[in-house]
Amino acid sequence: MDPIIKATIAAGVPYAVNIIRDILEKVPNIAGKGRAAKKRRNDLEDRLNKYLSNLYGTCSYLQTIAFASNPKPLEDLYIPTSLVHVSGEELLIDKLTNIFEKSSTVAVFDSAGMGKSTIVKRLVLNEIVSANSLPVLFELRSFRENDKLEEELLKLLKIQGLLPDEGLIFVDYPVSIYLDGLDEAPADLAAEITRQLLAFHEKYPRVRILVSSRRQTEISVLLSFYCYGVKNLTDQQAFELIERYDEGGDLSKSLIKAIKESSFPKIRAYLSNPLYVSLLFCAYRHKPSLPQKMSIFYERVYAALFDQHDLTKSADYTHSLKTGLDSREFMLVLRKLAFKCVLDGYRVEYSKIDFEEKVSSVVKSIEYHKIKVSDFLRDSTVAVPLFIDDGHTVRWAHKSLMEYFAALFICYDTENKDGEFMLKLVQDSNAYKYKHILEMCADVKYPSFRKTVAKYVLGDYVRHCDSKYQTISNRRIKKPDVLSRVQATYGIKAFLMLSNELSVSKISSGGLSIKLPWKNGTVANEVAPQGNCSKTEQQNIGVEGLVGMLSKICDPDCNNKNWFPAMNLQVDDEVGLLCFKKESVNRWLLRVIAEKESSEESSIIEITPDVALGNLSISKGTFYKITDDPKEKYNNSTNFKLVTGVLGDGLCVTIAEAKSILESIEADTSSTDLAAMLEAIG
């Protein structure tokens, strides 16, 4: 073990002692009586001491792509980050933060690379130092079929046989469970994990729980938790992180200067994400120019790792590759391996035996028979550290790396059927799972994406626009406003509620209680929760419970996993407006297409979801399911434009642009077919 990490583990012992002393006092019947009892008590103390001090050491270090073979102290790289609640409330995560101050169940949802796992480590360290509870960190990527969540948590504590009932630890002593990376669990097990989690919470209501995940369909049932997103890094925070990577050297000064002088519009978006900041640093260290596309970020990171092998060493230092593969050959193995991992339930972690079997099948399929699997394992974890070897398991250094190489496999290794592969992912019943792969495919090979995926999505969009809101005949509603609503409602199922109970004062005071309007056993406006819920069971709930209920709405069109839950909450001093939506993967893809097709800002609609709530004339306390029915209050002349503003949430292509792009795609396809015919006849 690294002596520095060993010393850090030792530094965690005093904190562990404080927690253990408290546990021994608070948990009854730990050991019974007599000599055997005393031994069990000593064993419990010893096991928890080892567990907590090791957890302290583990959480005190970060393994980053920039320094994959040289873990860095968390304190050296962590920039205090804010979490943002749906109400707009911000919580700064620093050494003093208690994440459970507002709720005993918390969820942190955000996109790839926003630093969720780092935040979890910071919070676990806080828990250990404060000795307020016994923290248990479970990285969900290691969850396997037939695993039981409660049993896995107890295994981590290693207290089996020391209590009459191991579950007593969750009953008699404050415990905080940190479940990191729901999105990194095998895809087919995510729903089972959430089911077990909710059952665990019901069995042990005193246990505090935090779940972190990318935004994905399985999080619907966790929207009843106190939900946070991660606030984007500011430019200044990004620059500070770059300086910390470089330890104040000249490279960071050069990179920051290049960023400030850059006219590349997307560079600021890249700076908002900690992962992309680290990739930018890696890419710039390898080649001192700013990459213009996300795929080029990853391409340069791979080149940097392969050519220099270790960014912590001097430029002329390399680890020789035991496989003897060159960069192109090594990339071929990685691409096929990544795609196999995606097909294997999107798994990012394997036991060493399973990983070696996976690599062996890939090597044989591309006829690299002379390569030893053990050599590839060494190369991919040490020389070109795209994987992390934890001793018994091997995992991708970051899930986004697997997605990048899988996208390259689709684009370059599918015998000119790349577009067909992309379209199959879009039409899959769980297409949202492939979101980042599809985005990367569009970045790497947009012509193929355009001929298949864009054509499919734009055709669906045009059909929506030609069929919806045709019966709005109120002359006081202008045609451009109808067109805006049509475009804003593509690919969403939306529900609105205006309520005095959602005001700033109610939320900030913690006195929020929403009384749901029931009609014939269901929520008004024919919006019903799943199952047989009585009036009393659901009548008084907070905003988190309200969202949790809405996530279970019985809507046949939203049952498949191509629909993704989202919500926003606008509040002022007197009233609040909750908008709950389920968004289709096609709507998200439309934004990708808009960005790729647009050459000017003017050709993109930007809808800002911000309205003067006092001007909205709908019944307070009533749920409204948004449809194109002209008889509904939200579709009258007073509310129509305001509600459109609430529903809109970003980029969308106009109907005219969609038809123009489709015509262009058809023309390109015809030209390609003609060229193929001419080539065929010589």
Image: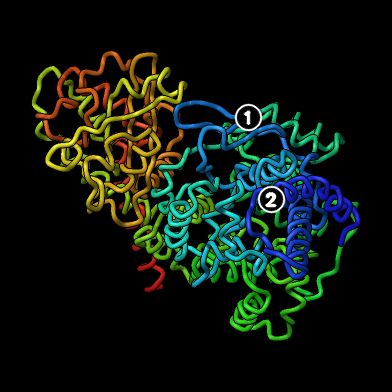
Residue 103 visible here: yes
For the C terminus, give its image quadrant. bottom left
Q: Which residue is mark 2?
A: 23
Q: Mark 2 or 1, which is nearer the eye?
A: 2
- Helix or strand or loop: what does disc 1 sit on? strand
Residue 504 pos. (x, y %): 42, 19
For disc 2, the neighbor class at 10 Å (few under 14, some 14 to 19, many from 20) is: many
Residue in front for this viewpoint, 358 or 296: 358
What is the count of numbered marks?
Answer: 2
User: Residue 461 falls in which quadrant of the image?
Assistant: top left
- Residue that appears at 41% across and 24% down: 511
Q: Amino acid at mark 2?
A: Ile
Residue 158 pos. (x, y %): 68, 65
For disc 1, the neighbor class at 10 Å (few under 14, some 14 to 19, many from 20) is: some
Residue in front for this viewpoint, 176 or 355: 176
- Residue that appears at 81% across and 31% down: 253
Q: Which residue is mark 1?
A: 92
Residue 641 pos. (x, y %): 25, 22
Left or right, residue 617 beside residue 95: left
Residue in front for this viewpoint, 26 or 91: 26
